[in-house]
Amino acid sequence: MTSENHWQPSKHIAVPLYQQIYEYIREQIISGTWPVGYKLPSQRKLADTLAVNRSTVVYALEELKADGWIDSTVGRGTVVGKSTWNSLAANKPADWKSYVQSGTHLPNIQMIQEINKAEFSAKVIRLGTGELSPSLLPTHIIQQAFQESATLSLSYPEGKGSFELRQAISHYLRKKGIAASPNSIMIVSGAIQALQLISIGLLDQNSAILNESPSYLNSIMVFQSAGIQMIPIPINNDGLSYSAISRAKRQYSTSLLYTIPTFHNPTGYVLSEAKRKELLEACSKERIPILEDDVYGDLWLDEPPPPSLKALDKQGNVLYVGSMSKVLGPGLRIGYIAAPEPVIDRLADIKMQTDYGSSTLSQFAVAKLLANGQYEVHIEKMRLELRKRRDFVLTLLSQYFADLAVWEKPAGGFYIWLTLNKEIPLQLLFKRALQQGILINPGSLYGNYHRHIRLSYAYASYEELEKGLIALAALIREF
């Protein structure tokens, strides 16, 4: 029973509640929504979701089991029974479970799946979510952009994306020291699609990607699903270990280096300009292209960060990925890639084969906001608000976590990388926190980091941040 399913039995009709539940579950099985082997939620969870007593759920499940619809075994729980379809037809149904397990795209980390589900619950305090609070999104100026438009196209865009938007992004990047013509820019449906297109369009299964450790890249299966090996490069006090890059190049058939040098996810660190130049030189020497993820670059809070690697690159060695989602709202799904034209042409061809172009409506809105200057006006407002939120969380951490953890003050982005003084079972902490309505992002999602938690000050309200952090500190003390 998914979070999108809000069906509940009615207490205002003559049919008993257990019978309504019986018919509902039976219908899910008959329709194929719950195939053979599908594991039903626990009795307690069903009772909570359906807003009935647990005994009512137990009675309904016993009836279903008696009629051969479900099976129950100790340790495995309750699943749709193998004999189910004997009640419906002589022919066997499609074995959807085997299909699901045979897909080439790897399933996400179990904890990430749980986080993705919990984030849609209004009862959960989201302490790790990497997006702006809905109250901070510029809904009104986007609505105004549509209202003021005399012409609005709903046709397919070209593979590279709307020329108006690519031109606007080209002008904007020029202000950041990046020379990229509209023809060397491609619009994508968020930065994750950029990574996916690169994984299947530029790399083969013998490739290996050097990535920072810890890294956001470990929490998604984009490159792993393409059969590409991930080689972690530790982040030290000065940034990436350049000697480790050289060793990895000698050991593996390395294809590129993935890095978030500005307001890194999850640590929040910023690579200095001198170290950026060293990194460019090291990768040029080792003939390793760089994939620079700069989705947080606009969200500096105290002072502008150093120039991007792309701005410092004089050899065309950097693929640059940016996004408007972190500033204007994730629902727009607008990001972009700036790269040499042959690379853009290749990726645009693949994009046309997969989704035939990103939303024309979203592209229109972002182009309008970039052209009329409202994008930059909104960024200024976001910086002010995020600065207040960051400082508010830092104060809370000083009050409630001083004896539990250490952390650095982030200069931008969304995150604080909390390092616990003692290692505790993060999986258990995650579950106990979620039981109390608190959602966290343990460090184990980003690599072998079992004393860390990624906190975000961007999403939860001030009241939720205070309530959630106080409760989290109490839970950590229990360990």
Image (cartoon, rainbow, N blue to C red):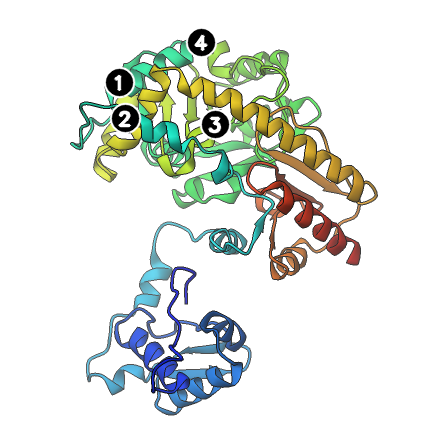
Q: Compute the Cα span from label 3 to label 2.
A: 20 Å
Task: Tell me where residue 230 appears, x and y as whole percent.
Answer: 51, 38
Percent position (x, y) of residue 311?
Answer: 47, 11
Which numbered disc flags the more N-terminal residue, 4 or 2? Answer: 4
At label 2, the amino acid type is Phe
Q: Quadrant of residue 80?
A: bottom left
Residues at marks 3 and 1, CA–CA distance in whole angstroms? 21 Å
In the rendered structure, which amino acid carries the disc numbered 4?
Lys
Task: Residue type at mark 3: give it.
Answer: Val
In the image, which disc is placed on residue 164?
Answer: 1
Which of label 3 and label 2 is nearer to you? Answer: 2
Q: Which residue is mark 4?
A: 175
Position in image of residue 334 (x %, y %)? 36, 31
Q: Measure the C-alpha gap from mark 4 to mark 1.
A: 17 Å
Name the residue rendered at 83%, 43% in the picture. 403
Residue at point 57%, 36% (across, down): 458
* Count of marks overlaid on the render: 4
Mark 3 highlights which residue? Answer: 295
